[in-house]
Image (cartoon, helix red, strand yellow):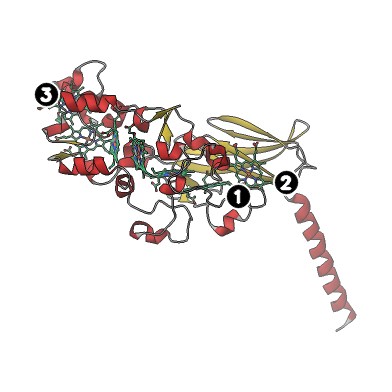
Amino acid sequence: MNMLKRLSIVLVLLLAVAQGASVTENKPPTVIVLPQENTLVHELPLSVVVKVDSNAVDAVKILNASGEKTIDINGSKAIYCKTIALVLGDNTLHIRSYKKGQLIDEQKRHLYVTSPLYSQYKYPPTQYKRQFFHTDRNESACRSCHDMSVNEKQGIAFIDVTESNCYACHHQLTTEKYAHAPSVNWLCTSCHNGKVGSDNAWQKGRSKFLVTKPVNSLCFSCHKKNAKLWKSYRFRHEPLDSGRCNKCHNSHSSPYKMFVRKPVNSICLGCHKDKRMRVKQRDSDCEGTIKGKECVACHSPHASNKQFFLMDEEERKKLESKQHGRER
Ligand code: HEC
Ligand code: HEC
Ligand code: HEC
Ligand code: HEC
Ligand code: HEC
Ligand code: HEC
Ligand code: HEC
């Protein structure tokens, strides 16, 4: 090899080293571990996890349409975590890093929250993808500080729910006023046991905590009395028959009685859009015109032996006497 050629190889190598160095210098002081870009979200609380160079950064702010949260970087560790609230539809997270009050880095994440209850949020734009979290690979980034194994005993409620291994990251799921008994007792794996069933074979390996059964058979595995009663009725509501309990109920908690996802009337009117119209046009005998009455004052949301799922006095009293979910 002649001298010139050797020299040029050395030069190229030197250049590569220099470039390598400049790349590490330009590395952002904050790396977003979660969420991934273009994540499709179903339930509202979301985890944000950042890896921070604590020499360069002393505060990280997470901004979105529902507010701002600040993480103080105290230098004692490299990874910081925060649960944040999102809004329905498009969300842009701005993750800003500060040193002594000066903005030194800003990164963005785009997310989309979908909901079956609102026609405008039912079909997310195609760039958003469902990202499952609980795989060995993803969990390995958290294991040094969090235990993600299942520590609940089948059917036995925690006396102190903070002892559940799921609580540390998912505590926001059960904080709403009306909560579902198995969720509020942190018996998460009564529904999320991760076994692969016929309903989710295509999701095999994507998460350890999938809901394995179609939703209605999942619910009916505990609510056996309801299942028997409703199946015996002559008239059954379509969303019940097609197994879409979670269209109306949030399995964890919600601000509304029986942890329905929205106030009852707006749930009903979400699908029965024509109801308001018809009422105005007076071409229906639905007594939904009576001011201040909830649809479920007259209609069972599930099933009945009467047409239009109308309830008699006794059935109505029964529904009203229910606990409406555990009040907190
Ligand atoms: C260096 C240790 C460490 C690592 C690694 C770590 N966490 Fe955390 N995490 C914590 C600590 C400590 C808390 C409690 C923080 C607090 O109370 O402010 C926490 C809290 C959380 C919370 C609740 C935040 C809130 O606002 O209540 C979530 C969610 C979370 N972590 C998710 C994760 C995920 C997901 C990973 C892996 C990608 C991870 N963490 C990795 C230490 C860590
Ligand atoms: C280290 C924090 C952490 C712990 C502990 C944890 N999770 Fe999660 N989990 C997450 C994150 C992050 C997601 C993604 C959604 C989000 O941002 O909250 C998630 C998502 C899920 C999902 C949706 C499916 C999926 O894989 O994305 C289920 C179900 C779930 N967790 C159940 C559980 C159960 C049950 C436990 C307790 C055995 C548990 N989690 C413990 C962080 C955690
Ligand atoms: C009564 C059954 C039930 C119980 C108990 C329950 N869940 Fe769920 N969970 C569901 C259903 C149904 C969904 C919606 C899943 C779907 O539509 O695929 C869900 C969704 C979730 C999601 C969001 C996944 C997504 O679709 O984005 C997380 C996270 C989650 N559950 C965690 C938990 C944790 C943690 C607990 C324990 C406190 C718990 N769940 C208890 C039934 C349940
Ligand atoms: C692991 C068993 C279990 C599963 C699975 C389960 N539930 Fe429950 N559910 C309970 C218990 C226990 C209660 C509280 C006792 C009661 O009031 O009947 C309850 C209460 C309720 C209530 C309030 C009833 C009342 O009278 O206050 C509703 C609504 C409800 N569940 C809906 C659902 C839906 C929808 C699903 C499916 C997503 C489901 N449940 C799955 C155990 C379960
Ligand atoms: C169309 C919406 C809708 C669907 C679908 C639906 N529910 Fe309900 N459910 C409600 C409403 C509304 C209430 C009563 C709320 C109130 O009285 O304020 C209720 C109450 C309940 C109750 C307590 C009252 C009772 O009759 O025992 C249970 C249990 C229950 N639902 C379980 C289920 C299960 C299981 C499914 C799926 C098989 C389901 N629901 C599907 C809307 C619905
Ligand atoms: C997820 C969409 C959805 C929700 C939410 C919903 N319904 Fe329905 N409902 C349907 C469908 C679909 C049918 C069957 C198609 C039809 O007959 O119009 C139906 C049928 C009915 C019928 C019988 C109509 C007839 O002509 O036989 C009544 C009454 C009714 N729903 C009342 C309610 C009430 C009260 C609520 C709120 C508790 C409610 N619905 C919530 C979808 C929904
Ligand atoms: C005071 C009792 C009462 C209330 C409250 C009520 N309804 Fe009705 N509804 C009826 C009766 C009675 C019928 C049967 C009418 C008939 O026989 O033609 C009916 C019929 C219906 C029907 C089927 C026939 C049609 O007109 O399409 C639907 C759907 C319906 N109601 C939805 C609703 C919704 C949604 C609400 C809440 C916004 C509501 N109802 C509130 C008593 C009521």
Q: Position of residue 85 (x, y in %)?
A: 52, 34
Q: Position of residue 76 (x, y in %)?
A: 77, 42
116 with respect to 21 (left or right): left
**Which residue has dot 3 on it?**
285
**Which residue has dot 2 on it?**
78
**Which residue has dot 1 on it?**
147
Looking at the rendered structure, the secondary structure element under dot 1 is loop
Check mark 3 vs ligand 7: CB closer than 8 Å? yes or no. yes
Question: From where the camera sits, is residue 89 visible?
Answer: no
147 with respect to 223 (left or right): right
Looking at the rendered structure, the secondary structure element under dot 3 is loop
User: Who's the residue at 25% across and 40% down the image?
Assistant: 226
Q: How many angstroms separate mark 1 from mark 2 (CA)?
A: 18 Å
Identify the residue at the far bottom of this view.
Answer: 1
Amino acid on which disc 3 is placed: Asp
Looking at the rendered structure, the secondary structure element under dot 2 is loop
User: Who's the residue at 44% across and 49% down the image?
Assistant: 154
For residue 53, the mark is none
Q: How many angstroms separate mark 2 from mark 3 (CA)?
A: 65 Å
Q: Quadrant of ligand 1?
A: top right
